[in-house]
Image (spheres, rainbow, N blue to C red):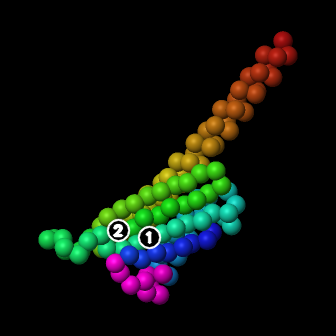
Amino acid sequence: MNISIKATGIELTDALRDYVNDKVGMLERFMSCDREAVMAVVEIGKTTNHHKLGDFFRAEINMNMPGQNLRTETEESDLYAAIDVAKDHMAEELKTKNKKKATLLKRGGRLIKTLLRFGRQ
């Protein structure tokens, strides 16, 4: 998986880059397609500089897979928490996508079996 990281309003340090690569790299185990064909664009940063309650950070993950694009975005008071929540949401989307694909495959197999069973009579 190719991971591209963009930082807005903050400096992209090596520690942040490694953290994002580790967290987004974990998502590979939920993918059912060719991992080399997947492009993940991660944008992290500070939303504004004038909140009364402190800083708010956002993390956005866009995954471009063959035939499908998935996107998730979160805002948290901690940058690392925003990255974790965005990763969790993307993992749920990938699981849902895989479950839906398996369900459609089973339903198609069931239909073929029914057609074969009643076609012999």
Quadrant (top left, top right, bottom left, bottom right) of the C terminus: top right
Residue 85 image point, x, y percent: 39, 64
Residue 38's quadrant in the figure?
Answer: bottom right
Residue located 44% across and 61% down the image: 88
| Secondary structure state at the residue bearing disc 1 | strand
Q: Is residue 69 above or below residue 39?
A: above
The numbered dot on residue 43 is 1
Instruction: Answer few, some or many: residues within 10 Å of disc 2's Cα (few below 14, many 20 plus, some between 14 and 19).
Output: many
Q: Is residue 70 magenta?
A: no
Q: Earlier in the sequence, mark 2 or mark 1?
A: 1
**Neighbour class for label 1 at 10 Å: few (<14), some, many (≥20)?**
some
Image quarter (top left, top right, bottom left or bottom right) of the N terminus: bottom right
Q: Is residue 49 above or below residue 70?
A: below
> Percent x, y for residue 59?
39, 67
Residue 8: image location, x then y, percent: 38, 75
The question of residue 16 being in magenta is answered with yes
Question: Which of the labelled discs sits on residue 58, or is there none?
Answer: 2
Report the label total. 2
- Indicate the quadrant where residue 112 lies: top right
The stretch of residues the image draws in magenta is 9-17
CA–CA distance between discs 2 and 1? 8 Å
